């Protein structure tokens, strides 16, 4: 009694790769077709992903995760925010950074020859050291305050304040330090900020260190405006708890700005791009699967003699199916790896050319590799079944 022989996984892989080794040119062109399909999958998802990242970056610059807190204006005796308000806001879990400024009600002058009552329409604010992080501000010239300079009579000017006071840029290192008068005291200008579109009040302000304002300008330590950033997903929840957090005694006297309209646009953009990615990936994988199926059907038709000979030598239908499924999966994997590399390179080149951030869509990349194999196996099911149904006499008679 003849017992059927079972092929080990290594034997099955060797037989499955036999067609690729013996027909290298056909395998190369078949893999090229698959690679083009997978490269298209990566490209049509990678380019929109880079575009999406650039768009979301621009929208985030509009303050989608920023809020401001201040006392209710217009009251006869407006309440003051507590001195510890910033520390209490920083304890809110989703808050990533919180800082504050306070109006010192002092006047600033370019020199002692100008009218003491003319403040040039500028505001002198006490500022905390982490203010630039909270409002996404950058220093255009000079430097920001540090733990040392915040205790001494030094200031940083907003962009509009610098223009009104006659400072274009600070002199190079070694030159005389420019100075301004606040009240009746001279302050050294150590930095000038770039424009801050999200905080135009800062542009028209002269910023003094928190401790220097206490010692030099009789500042009482109560913040006027609190600036904070938090996780975008929790911005509504943070906004809801801010009044009671900042002023537990009088939460109704606290005003919190509403989230930026750009946040709604950003969320709508994310949803639209997600649907686009799924649609493009599905179409590209479908095209790649059709290419694999077409290649394997032709391979079965061309190799009927080989199939008949193997069947005549005792190979059963299961082994024939396994052979063609293995070959189909190997061919798809080869094309998938090549296509993924080409797609990633093309995506990076296009993104760099457009000035976008280079985004490697990891889900699309993994889907391209895994999807190529899965699609190759699925696409090889019909050809493998067709090959297994050929009897030895039918296959050999076709020669």
Image: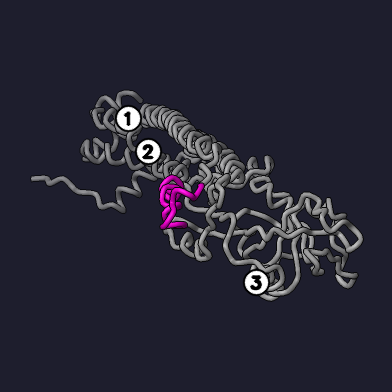
Q: Which residues are magenta?
A: 234-255
Q: CA distance from mark 3 to mark 1?
A: 80 Å
Where is the C terminus found, in terms of image quarters? Answer: top left
Q: Considering only vertical position in the picture, is 20 above or below 230? A: above
Q: Quick check: 358 left or right of 120?
A: left
Q: Considering only vertical position in the picture, is 236 above or below 166? A: above
Measured from the top left, where is residue 160 in percent x and y? 78, 50
Local crowd size for mark 3, using a 10 Å CA cut-off: few (<14), some (14–19), many (≥20)? many
User: Is 252 in the magenta?
Assistant: yes
Which element is circle 2 on?
helix
* Residue at which label 3 appears: 211
User: Residue shown at 32%/34% (left/top)?
Assistant: 378
Q: Quick check: 327 left or right of 232?
A: left
Where is the N terminus found, in terms of image quarters? Answer: top left
| N-terminal-most mark, 2 or 1 | 2
Q: CA distance from mark 2 to mark 3?
A: 73 Å
Q: Is residue 84 visible?
A: yes
Which element is circle 3 on?
helix
Q: Is residue 38 visible?
A: no
| N-terminal-most mark, 2 or 3 | 3
**Considering depth in this image, is 142 or 298 the residue closer to the camera?**
142
């Amino acid at each position: 009694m003849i017992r059927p022989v079972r092929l080990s996984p290594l034997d099955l892989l060797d037989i499955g790769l036999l067609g690729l080794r013996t027909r290298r040119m056909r395998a190369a062109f078949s893999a090229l077709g698959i690679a083009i399909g997978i490269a298209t999958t990566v490209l049509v998802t990678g380019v929109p992903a880079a575009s999406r990242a650039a768009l979301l970056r621009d929208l985030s610059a509009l303050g989608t995760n920023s809020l401001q807190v201040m006392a209710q204006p217009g009251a006869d005796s407006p309440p003051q925010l507590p001195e510890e308000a910033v520390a209490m806001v920083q304890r809110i879990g989703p808050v990533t950074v919180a800082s504050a400024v306070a109006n010192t009600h002092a006047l600033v002058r370019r020199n002692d020859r100008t009218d003491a009552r003319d403040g040039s329409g500028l505001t002198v604010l006490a500022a905390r050291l982490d203010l630039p992080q909270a409002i996404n501000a950058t220093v255009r010239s000079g430097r920001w305050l540090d733990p040392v300079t915040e205790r001494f009579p030094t200031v940083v000017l907003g962009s509009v304040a610098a223009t009104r006071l006659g400072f274009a840029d600070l002199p190079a290192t070694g030159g005389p330090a420019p100075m301004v008068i606040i009240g009746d005291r001279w302050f050294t200008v150590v930095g000038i900020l770039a424009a801050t579109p999200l905080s135009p009040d800062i542009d028209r302000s002269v910023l003094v260190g928190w401790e220097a304002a206490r010692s030099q300008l009789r500042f009482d330590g109560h913040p006027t405006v609190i600036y904070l950033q938090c996780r975008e997903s929790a911005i509504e929840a943070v906004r809801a708890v801010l009044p009671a957090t900042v002023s537990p005694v009088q939460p109704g006297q606290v005003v919190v700005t509403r989230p930026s309209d750009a946040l709604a646009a950003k969320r709508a953009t994310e949803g639209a791009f997600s649907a686009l990615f799924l649609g493009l990936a599905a179409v590209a994988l479908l095209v790649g699967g059709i290419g694999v199926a077409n290649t394997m059907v032709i391979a079965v038709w061309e190799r009927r003699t080989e199939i008949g000979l193997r069947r005549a030598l005792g190979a059963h239908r299961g082994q024939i199916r396994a052979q063609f499924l293995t070959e189909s999966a190997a061919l798809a994997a080869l094309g998938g790896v090549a296509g993924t590399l080409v797609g990633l390179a093309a995506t990076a080149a296009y993104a760099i050319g457009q000035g976008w951030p280079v985004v490697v869509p990891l889900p699309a990349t993994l889907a391209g590799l895994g999807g190529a194999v899965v699609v190759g196996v699925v696409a090889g099911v019909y050809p493998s079944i067709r090959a297994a149904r050929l009897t030895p006499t039918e296959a050999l008679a076709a020669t």
